[in-house]
Amino acid sequence: MQFNLLSFKLPTETVTINLYSEKVEKTRPNIVFKDELPVLWEENADALSDCKFLYCSFVNEETECKGNKYTATINLTNTPRFAINYIRHLIYTYFHGRVPAAFNQFRSR
């Protein structure tokens, strides 16, 4: 058995993303929870008072997300759950089409 280890450094500490209040049916967009972006919930207290999370897409937000749109900057060092999803997306995107081992469900569950 051979293991190939890659060092990986994040290209940036923060990511600016669009967040949406709803998801398109039968899709699996990423979820950003209220405790990961408390400032956004404070700034939009009236609109987000009943929301516990918002949706975002790293691939195609038009086909995965809908509803009210919010833009936020997420610090990846302060939001480990979101950061790991973002890193998995970056790794998958890098290897997809380069090696046969990359496929849609290669992420550990």
Image: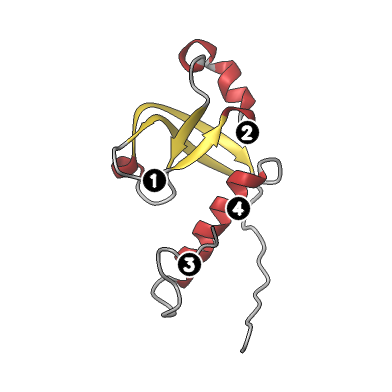
Q: Is residue 10 left or right of residue 99?
A: right
54 up-or-down from 98: above or below: above
Judging by the rendered image, the residue that carries numbered circle 3 is 106
At x 63% / y 29%, what residue is drawn?
35
Identify which residue, 10 or 84, lies in the foreground: 84
Q: CA distance from mark 4 to mark 1?
A: 16 Å
Amino acid type at image mark 2: Glu
The location of residue 51, given as percent across then percent down, is: 49, 21
At x 54% / y 13%, what residue is drawn?
45
Amino acid type at image mark 3: Phe
The reply to whether residue 104 is visible in this rendering is yes
78 up-or-down from 93: above or below: above
Q: CA distance from mark 3 to mark 1?
A: 16 Å
Sequence-wise, the earlier of marks 3 and 4 is 4
Sequence-wise, the earlier of marks 2 and 4 is 2
Judging by the rendered image, the residue that carries numbered circle 1 is 28
The reply to whether residue 14 is visible in this rendering is no
Q: From the viewer's perspective, is the residue at label 2 or at label 3 nearer?
A: 3
Q: CA distance from mark 3 to mark 4?
A: 14 Å
At x 48% / y 67%, what residue is drawn?
106
Sequence-wise, the earlier of marks 3 and 1 is 1
At x 36% / y 42%, what residue is drawn?
61
Amino acid type at image mark 1: Arg
Judging by the rendered image, the residue that carries numbered circle 4 is 84
Do the residues bearing badges 4 and 1 touch, measured as CB atoms within 8 Å?
no
